[in-house]
Amino acid sequence: MRQRRIGEFELIARYFAPLAKGFPGAGGLLSDNAFLPSDARRDFVVKTDTVVAGVHFLADEKPELVAAKALRVCLSDLAAGGGEPFTYQLSLALPKSWSERWIAGFARGLAADQRRYGIVLSGGDTVTTPGPLTVTVTAFGRVRHGRGLTRAGARAGDRLFVSGTIGDGALGLLAARGRITSAALEKRYRLPQPRSALGTRLVGIASAVADVSDGLLADAGHIADASRLAVAIERERVPLSADARRVIASEPALWANVLGGGDDYELVIAVSPRKEAALLAAARLAKTKVTAIGVFARGSGVELMVSGRPVRAPRKGYVHF
Amino acid sequence: MRQRRIGEFELIARYFAPLAKGFPGAGGLLSDNAFLPSDARRDFVVKTDTVVAGVHFLADEKPELVAAKALRVCLSDLAAGGGEPFTYQLSLALPKSWSERWIAGFARGLAADQRRYGIVLSGGDTVTTPGPLTVTVTAFGRVRHGRGLTRAGARAGDRLFVSGTIGDGALGLLAARGRITSAALEKRYRLPQPRSALGTRLVGIASAVADVSDGLLADAGHIADASRLAVAIERERVPLSADARRVIASEPALWANVLGGGDDYELVIAVSPRKEAALLAAARLAKTKVTAIGVFARGSGVELMVSGRPVRAPRKGYVHF
């Protein structure tokens, strides 16, 4: 008989949130980021993410893509916090079979993304491990003092917007595994595109933001939970890429992957009705499409509406363990 | 035939130092810490360290001690940078066999050290891994703006001091493995004691500082290299604990472990002759013994003097891979 074990969020709430109690910028570990007071004008937005070969990326992934993924999942969180990329720390646990050629490719991937996102390495650690390749990035962004965006802050009546298209990450994983065919979706899974340009423009506009890493329903739910609200999402409004639409048309059961699968690295954004025009203007400046897909209300939980009727949400997001 | 591979320092110099080129506070990745400008008065001292079960601590180590080790190796680096502990980010990669009981012990260990060192969790990540337990800590200290201590800065004529006693960590590892017998040495290996009280007092006094994590000769050598100097160390002056003295008396070959073994988490300190009195006063305030063991001179490399004669240094420090 397998012992029931608690999940990631329960684990954090029970054991780690108490350890962050004295640190206001940790927000009870309920948001993507921590905020460190920097000076009178700015805070650091700080995010740590670990990716493990065979768990968070394919075990034989190219080193350039491993580098990009490790860095970009953190940049996506900085975007959700409204942070402008500044610097990062890198920890690399190399399997004993590491080669210099692999490292050279990994460093090339980092260098390309440093130029692309305007971020620079400031330190880290390199060790070997008898286990799989494991990369931890702690990324620092900068945001106006006290103005960093969190998951908490949505109000009843706020609309829920989402950037870009949803489901490409989860369907891309199926494509990478050969279960479906789509080069575009596969690329989307392998190489996240953090919404850095949009994120920094949401400061002063959005009331709460998260990135879609665990899945649309889960991450919208994280905003609802942290803001102590309910959120209703209309499936018809969820923006899909042409490839995702084609896949869903032939296999509607994959809606579960679209809404619950994660790895999209889009932003879910709560915005008050009187700031919607400002949001649309910010999205135009960032050259990023945003789509209204739902609304926050008193209550709790996530309600998915299909053809005007509430349905059981297919999944509660990616379960880490 | 096994392919020759480059070592950790060559790897960093060749592939990672170029990535840190635009960040002045990274110091070319030559020092323990990065320095992030915080405000006009203070910088953040930032250090990332990864520890892997079976590599950096015994695979069956108690969770409280794993927590203490993961946090304290970073606190030791903050001490070497002159940083007062402030906050940390924690990444925990759990093997699939993790238990809630283990996590509870780990969190207890963190809570105890948070109280002891005045540091508080601000965020992190939790994932599972098919490999061994892997813990990455990014610790933040605070130091007066522009006054953080690095490995670079020693001048010819500076004396080399070391805090506490040397060799207990490496001999303690032998004790933990049952090769020698000493409860005191074993405890010293399992539970590092970072020199936080001394480190913060070295600001404005020391010209360069490192912590003894790779081994006395290696870490004194890191200061010499970063400062573009040579350093000579007199073995007779190296301070030993009573237990280490006893072990060495019965097995003099273990001098190699004492000088080259690492894991002491003492500080090696370069200080100009005119600041020696200030160093001794700071050490008294920190209730920490410091001992003069050598001197910096023009040139390069580490010279070990035994009975007044230079000898081949037994080891160049712990080789990470």
Image: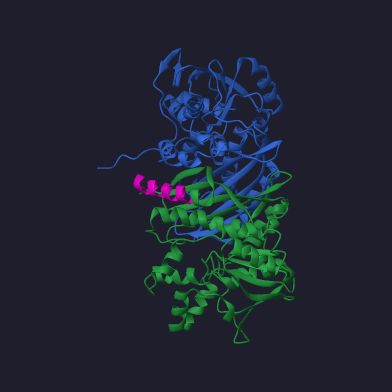
Chain colours: A green, B blue
Image coordinates for residue B139, horizontal then vertical, percent = 61, 44
In this picture, is B223 found above or below A263? Answer: above
Residue A89 located left or right of residue B205: left
Give A252 or B181, whichever is nearer the viewer. A252
Image coordinates for residue B109, horizontal then vertical, percent = 63, 49
Asked which quadrant contains residue B267, the reply is top right
Quarter holding the C terminus of chain B? top left
Magenta region includes residue A310:
no
Give A212 or A226, whichever is nearer the viewer. A212
In this picture, is A147 found above or below A255? Answer: above
Question: Which residue is located at x 42 percent, y 65 percent?
Answer: A187
Q: Main secondary structure of the magenta part?
A: helix
Give A169 or A301, whichever is nearer the viewer. A169
Residue B211 visible in the picture: yes
Quarter holding the N terminus of chain B? top left
In this picture, is A40 found above or below A25? Answer: above
Image coordinates for residue A277, horizontal then vertical, percent = 69, 68
Residue extent of the magenta highlight: A98-113
Residue B207 located left or right of residue B57: right
Asked which quadrant contains residue B103, the reply is bottom right
Q: Residue furthest top?
A: B308
Magenta region includes residue A104:
yes
Residue A129 visible in the picture: no
Question: Which residue is located at x 64 percent, y 25 percent?
Answer: B289
> Exactly how many numbered labels are in the figure?
0
Image coordinates for residue A321, horizontal then vertical, percent = 53, 65
